Amino acid sequence: MVMEETREINVTVSANEMEAYMLLAMPMPGEAYTVDMLKDALLSSGVVYGIKEDVLNQMVSEGIYEVKMLVASGKPAVDGKDGSYQYNFKQDPNKTPQIREDGTVDYWSMNLIETVVLGQVIAIYNPAVQGEMGYTVKGKEIPARLGKEMAPLKGRGFVRSNDNLTYVATTDGKIEFVSGRINITNFHEIFANVDSLFGNIDFAGDVVIHGNVCSGMSVRAGGTLTVDGVVEGATLWAGKDIVLRGGVLGDNRAQIFSRGNISARFFEYAKVEALGTIQADTLLQCEVECKQSIRLEGKKGVIVGGRVHAIEGIVVNDIGNAKEVKTQVEVGIGEEIRQKIFDIREQIMELRKNLDRVTKALSRFEQLEKEQGVSYKQDPRRVALLRSSICDSAREKAFRVELAELKAQDAASKDSTIKVNRTIYPGVFVVIGTQKILVKDEQFAVEYVLRGDKIVLRGDEIVG
């Protein structure tokens, strides 16, 4: 009897042909299986891929019989991954208010716009990954799905870097993802009232509001801010000009600041500050600070109540009223600014003296290094001197910038005047520089100027 007739090798293949199993029958005494016999059996069954030779060796060496063993495995196909974008901005800003722990609604948590800044990476492209072919145990190919590349981003306000993967903003502004396009614009337009339901606004570019700005709200624009409606007791800040077509009903809570010019129909019970000029028709019970000039020459053109100060001058139709409401108008710079100029000069001189002492001490260390051939770079005393020098130099630079601004204001205030086109009423205080007078009688079409240390009417004798 030959051995092949007494041995039985059973091979089965799974329905999907991804696995092959083998079962060895118990051999007759004195007979044995070999690895080659097992391989031949697999080949006869069409199994040619993923054969586990270590398992075949184990079955023969350890005599594993009557046990179904996994002896071959196919390789599943690995599908490719499509290209994708990683966005570094919120594609859908939060338009839902948060609920506080006490159950109340925080409407100020709403964020209706998403902004970016110049140079910000807004998106990174992850290239497609190609798939890998798979095989069954019988050697049949299993095709893999190919990864698809995505089209480059389209829109405006950004560029694609040289690596073709990184997208960078070319301007500050509002970023929107609309119909597959990314648009960055330095302009934000609002067709609604800015109230607690809408939320506060903080935008890097220009802002146009076609409604009102309600009490308690805050609007901050890096560029020009325009409001078509009425501003209530709100806070406005602009990096450029502010245009208020509907005026301000401030309720002694409105605070308005502009690094440029401000124009409005009227201001009532508000605090207003501009680094440029201010133009309006009415200032009623306001606290106003203007680094250039104020002009109220509209149909009313009136200042009633409060304190109004402009460094370069004021032109107005009427000041005060027949009820002699306490009103103060000021031009030029006062003793406080002049004292500040003096103090800054003193501080600069003191810093210069200290810097000279530090420079000499550092020179002494350099001399010792040359004489002794020893480095003093890490010496705590020298390190402390360097830190002091850096700190004092930075402070001196900041003081000199501030001093230049104050001196420019001082120069601009030299010829500042208060020009009244129609009437100035009793009860009005007129301040020019450090001088102050109280108007006791109605005066018409006058201009107040400073002559020496006296306030006079242009072309007239000393007043007050």
Image (cartoon, rainbow, N blue to C red):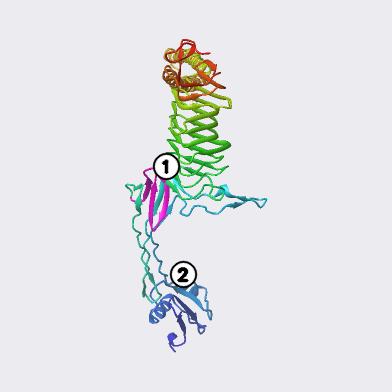
**Looking at the picture, does residue 407 appear above or below residue 42?**
above
- The picture places residue 361, in percent across and down from the top left corner, at 48, 13
Mark 2 crowd level (few <14, some 14–19, many ≥20, 10 Å Cα) = few
Which SS class for mark 1? Answer: strand
> Which mark is drawn over residue 54?
2
Which SS class for mark 2? Answer: helix
Dot 2 and dot 1 residues touching (CB under 8 Å): no
Pick the residue in front: 92 or 6: 92
Pick the residue in front: 4 or 46: 46
Residue at image mark 1: 206
Pick the residue in front: 423 or 330: 423
Pick the residue in front: 238 or 352: 238
Q: What residue sits 56% from the left and 51% below the top?
A: 197
Q: Is residue 175 magenta?
A: yes
Q: Is residue 180 magenta?
A: yes
Mark 1 crowd level (few <14, some 14–19, many ≥20, 10 Å Cα) = many
SS assignment for the magenta stretch, majority: strand
- Tell me the quadrant of the picture where the N terminus can be found: bottom left
Query: How far is the residue under mark 2 from the one under mark 1?
Result: 73 Å
Give the residue type at disc 2. Answer: Asp
Report whether 464 appears left or right of 161: right
What stretch of residues is rendered in magenta?
164-187
- The picture places residue 98, in percent across and down from the top left corner, at 59, 52
